[in-house]
Image (spheres, coloured by chain):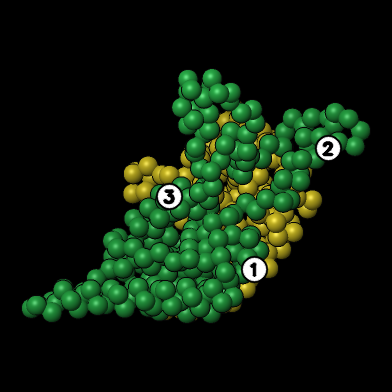
Chain colours: A green, B yellow
């Protein structure tokens, strides 16, 4: 990249010379080093090789397709109070195959039983319960990291689908994984409703993993 | 949260050998095909591109012209599907295309079962309020019927 001369430096602020935008991983990206978009690859209109031995556009496209993982960040909404690290192993194996980072998201909702709590200790109980759940999430994340290092956790408060969608946009995830075998403890949402909501509103891909019980004739009875 | 048998279905997901791509050749099909091809290529799996042609209900009562129109539509979609298959073949060596007729969700889930597919890739749309009210979106229907994991791909423009 051409560096500005002293005169040019005086007349323009440095931020105009260096595009200080960052990529999805928070790395500083300058115009010269901006990585190519990972999204859909061009496969039409291939160019012929310019010189003998140099790869043409076609070769580079195929090479890119072979090297770049289509999924780099995965969001897994979980209930940290019930899920064990062993339950996440299948999804983590997939993440490993994609060489992707995984974020475990727990969305905390105050249990209904706390709605009837009264007195001075009521608020403290809620806070204590929330902290307990958060600790469980951190513990789960630590256990997962024992066999899958690219894992982190997020704790959110609010409506389950809203928080999942917000986290997905904020983290720029490529995939949201919802295991249908998992029954989320949510006051207003079943796992199927949650999946429908995510499919219709998410900006990234959504993967629904059916439960093993679904295999068989009875799956046709689940149709709407 | 209850864990039923996620381990078993998850193991199936890990060993992806056959991917079924349900595609509507008229909308954002190229991007979805490339995405599915990349996924299949990543797992060294084969790709089957499927389109379900569902003629309008009035066509049963139409005259000869109507039948000709439907035949023309069918041929056009078949040609488009072949084109997509050729494009995907650049990324995935093992690729085939299938054109089916009937109710999309039913046909795709049946095809996936017949082929013993490990993954279904479909395009997701952000449906309108009416479409959601009347349950016209195909993606959730396929998700409910499929025996294997379903990946709903959202294109930037959908």
In this rendering, the count of numbered labels is 3
The residue indicated by pointer 2 is A55
The earlier-in-sequence mark between 2 and 3 is 2
Please provide percent x and percent y for residue A40.
Answer: 62, 41
Q: Is circle 1 on the same chain as circle 3?
A: no
Can residue A211 be seen here? The reply is: yes
The residue indicated by pointer 3 is A169
The residue indicated by pointer 1 is B14
Q: Is mark 1 on a helix, strand or loop?
A: helix
Rendered view: B82 above or below A90: above
Mark 2 belongs to chain: A
Q: Given contact means CB atoms under 8 Å apart, are the residues at marks 1 and 3 in contact?
A: no
Instruction: Kindly report which numbered mark, 1 or 3, lies closer to the viewer in this rendering.
Output: 3
Residue at the outermost right position = A52
**Distance in Å between CA atoms under marks 2 and 3:** 37 Å
Dot 2, how many residues are within 10 Å of its Cα: few (below 14), some (14-19), or many (20+)?
A: some
Please provide percent x and percent y for residue A164.
Answer: 39, 58
Residues B55 and A214: in front is A214
Which quadrant would residue B108 be assigned to in this image? bottom right
Residues A221 and B48: in front is B48
């Amino acid at each position: 990249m051409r560096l500005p001369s002293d005169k040019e430096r005086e007349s323009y602020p440095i931020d105009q010379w260096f595009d200080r935008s960052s990529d999805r991983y928070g790395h500083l990206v300058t115009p010269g080093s901006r990585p190519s978009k990972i999204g859909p690859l061009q496969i039409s209109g291939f160019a012929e090789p310019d010189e003998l031995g140099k790869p043409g556009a076609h070769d580079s496209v195929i090479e890119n397709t072979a090297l770049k993982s289509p999924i780099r960040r995965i969001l897994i909404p979980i209930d940290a109070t019930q899920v064990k690290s062993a339950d996440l192993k299948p999804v983590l194996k997939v993440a490993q195959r994609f060489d992707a980072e995984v974020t475990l998201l727990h969305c905390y909702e105050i249990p209904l039983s706390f709605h009837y709590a009264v007195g001075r200790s009521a608020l403290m109980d809620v806070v204590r319960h929330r902290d307990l759940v958060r600790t469980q999430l951190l513990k789960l994340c630590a256990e997962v990291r024992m066999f899958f290092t690219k894992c982190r956790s997020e704790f959110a408060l609010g409506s389950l689908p809203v928080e999942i969608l917000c986290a997905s946009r904020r983290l720029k995830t490529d995939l949201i994984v919802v295991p249908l075998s998992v029954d989320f403890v949510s006051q207003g949402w079943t796992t199927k409703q949650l999946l429908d909501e995510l499919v219709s509103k998410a900006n990234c891909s959504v993967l629904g993993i059916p439960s093993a019980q679904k295999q068989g004739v009875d799956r046709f009875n689940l149709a709407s | 949260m209850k864990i039923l048998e996620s381990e078993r279905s998850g193991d199936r997901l890990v060993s992806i050998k056959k991917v079924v791509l349900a595609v509507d050749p008229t909308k954002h099909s190229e991007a979805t095909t490339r995405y599915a091809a990349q996924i299949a290529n990543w797992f060294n799996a084969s790709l089957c591109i499927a389109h379900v042609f569902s003629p309008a209900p009035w066509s049963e009562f139409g005259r000869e012209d109507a039948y000709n129109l439907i035949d023309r539509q069918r041929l056009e979609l078949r040609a488009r599907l072949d084109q997509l298959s050729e494009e995907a073949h650049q990324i995935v060596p093992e690729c085939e295309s299938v054109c089916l007729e009937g109710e999309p969700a039913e046909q795709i889930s049946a095809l996936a079962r017949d082929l013993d597919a490990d993954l279904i890739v479909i395009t997701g749309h952000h449906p309108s309020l009416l479409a959601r009210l009347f349950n016209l979106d195909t993606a959730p229907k396929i998700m409910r019927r499929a025996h294997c994991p379903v990946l709903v791909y959202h294109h930037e423009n959908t």
